[in-house]
Image: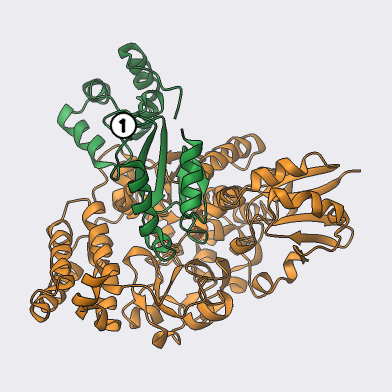
Amino acid sequence: MSTRIYVPRDAAALALGADAVAAALADADVQIVRTGSRGLFWLEPMVEVATAGGRVAYGPVRATDVPALLAAGMLRGGDHALRLGRPEKLPFLAKQTRVTFARCGVIDPLSIEDYRAHGGGVGLAKARELGPAVTIAEVTESGLRGRGGAGFPTGIKWKTTADAPGERKYIVCNADEGDSGTYADRMLMEGDPFALIEGMAIAGFATGAGKGYVYTRSEYPHAIATFDAALKIARREGLLGDGFDIEQRVGAGAYVCGEETSLLESLEGKRGQVRAKPPLPAHHGLFGMPTVVNNVISLASVPAILAQGAAHYKAMGFGRSRGTMPIQLAGNVRHGGLFEAGFGLTLGEIVSEIGGGTASGRPVRAVQVGGPLGAYFPPALFDTPFDYESFAAKDGLIGHGGVVVFDDTVDMVRQARFAMEFCTVESCGKCTPCRIGSVRGQEVIDKIMAGTNVDKNLALLTDLCHTMKFGSLCALGGFIPYPVMSALTHFPEDFRRPLHRAAA
Amino acid sequence: MADQEPWSRERAAAIIAAEAGREGAALPILHALQAEFGFVPREAIPMIAAALNITRAEMHGVVTFYHDFRDHAPGRHVLRLCRAEACQAMGGDALGAYARDCLGVDWHGTTADGAVTLEPVFCLGLCAIGPAGMLDGKPLGRLDVAGVDAALADAV
């Protein structure tokens, strides 16, 4: 019998040559299974061989390494410089608590048999046994909060939608993962799409919705293809049906469509401009009907919560942030990857111990947490626990869990300028503080960089950020002050170096 | 990006008709048109407006809101480079400047020979292997000058 060998098909693994590795292995007596990624990107493409003693990993494997690996007896788990041993024993994986990502990188993402063999489908069966009301109560009891960034309790959102009158209801999955430094949604949709489908089916059952939409960003062609393929299989295999179906829609490059009301407008075929709230989408959402809008990770966490019980999930975490969070290490970091763990690790543990510091080997100077709307934290704040409230208390946010590391070559006034520039490009234009404020903010920072009336312009920038924060309609204009003001607060010296910059 | 069809009113009408019955059909229609023609031809706007029973002005507003939809044909290949923070932390800005220099175009520009269009993108979800890019939908990671050169060599 030929040896089973696992080669990832995750977009990041493909970017590092996974297809060429699979092609090089195809000549050997092997059965190749394409999986998602385990999320250890400095080791991708990470190839795993099924042996009598469990899987043995090798990585990072290039196609040119394959002949030597085969000669070294890779198919029996033989020794080689690239041999990593049992993947579960790798410290980066061994220290994690994989709940939502338990199957990602392990199974064939499009094999319903694999999915079921690894616990898939149990949550939906449990929900049907419990009935809609008890299912919602379980989700509420688990303490699950929206993993897209806002952190709103998922169970309460479901209850509001379930109780709202409407001739039809919708489950909308926000897969418009636009934050730089985040890729958890992409990995899950490429590596375990049935988990999302099952989570949405549970949400539909619990709230009485008959239709689900997944709004996926166009920058993720591999996730889109895998998810569409998974939908076809799910319909055939009965994971969908029974009064609930899902359709995937593709975004069109607008960051603001990750904001839930803008996403709904876009799904309706309009410009992706935000709506004023209230009314809440739970009352008045897609096409005016009661709608649950949840992030991919929130929905994909639900099957495991139901399968294992709310108490089990709730037991993990920290403070009011319960359960696990997939932290995504990115940017200039030695061990970049997805680390799912209970809330409460400190930022320093995440960056220095788990991430291993910078990839460049230079000192860490700043860490941006929570995407382009998140604050820049200096190492002095590394004792901050990773949870919703602790980050808010330090004028930051955890957002969707992205952690972007910068070394000491970063120029923080440029990062502040980029935040404003990004907002000028991505503002939906509906409210004045965001539409005009971001343009003015960029101009003011240009003056500061040129050394013009620096004190006066810094005061103006601070005032402008205040206006944007409290006057904007949604989180884009409202949160852009976080990266700008945190850069100014924690790295003021970078805003007063015009001569240095002119020379550079 | 090859195999894109020249404008055909009949073909556009068929594409619009195939999608128009869906809830919120505008984006599926626009994506389908762009997949066929490489961009959203101006002539198609009133046709979509008529199919969806909205004004041409409204439809124009929708098309121009989204970064993805082009109003003219791209080059034979499209190179997208990530400009977002995680890639900046790995030298993405300098790489973008290098690519613009090599190609002699600014962002969104197409080389004079029509071979390559250079587009900025804000995040491809390849943030742990930056700087990242995409050539005709093929993901690229840990790009450096040599990587951009190789991608461009592939694109000629």
What residue occupies the far right of the structure in this picture? A1
Judge from the rendering whether residue A286 lies leftward or rightward of residue A27; answer left or right.
left
Q: Residue at x 24, y 72 (%)?
A: A503
Judge from the rendering whether residue A452 lies leftward or rightward of residue A2; answer left or right.
left
Query: Does residue A366 appear anywhere in the picture?
Result: yes
Judge from the rendering whether residue A180 lies leftward or rightward of residue A33; answer left or right.
left
| Residue B144, percent from left and from top | 48, 55
| Residue A334, percent from left and from top | 55, 71
Crowding at label 1, few (<14), some or many (≥20) Cα neighbours within 10 Å?
few
Q: Nearest the camera: A284 or A373?
A: A373
Chain in orange on the image:
A
What residue occupies the far top of the structure in this picture? B10
Q: Residue at x 59, y 61 (%)?
A: A41
Q: Chain of mark 1?
A: B
Q: Nearest the camera: A334 or A273?
A: A334
> How has the structure been colored for display?
by chain
What residue occupies the far front of the structure in this picture? A503
Chain B's colour is: green
- The relative height of residue B145 versus residue B43 in the rendered view (above or below) is below
For disc 1, the marked residue is: B112
| Residue A457, percent from left and from top | 10, 75
**Which quadrant, please, contains the N terminus of chain B?**
top left
Q: In what element is the residue under mark 1? A: loop
| Residue A230, percent from left and from top | 59, 40
Query: Does residue A284 appear anywhere in the picture?
Result: no
Q: Residue at x 49, y 83 (%)?
A: A348
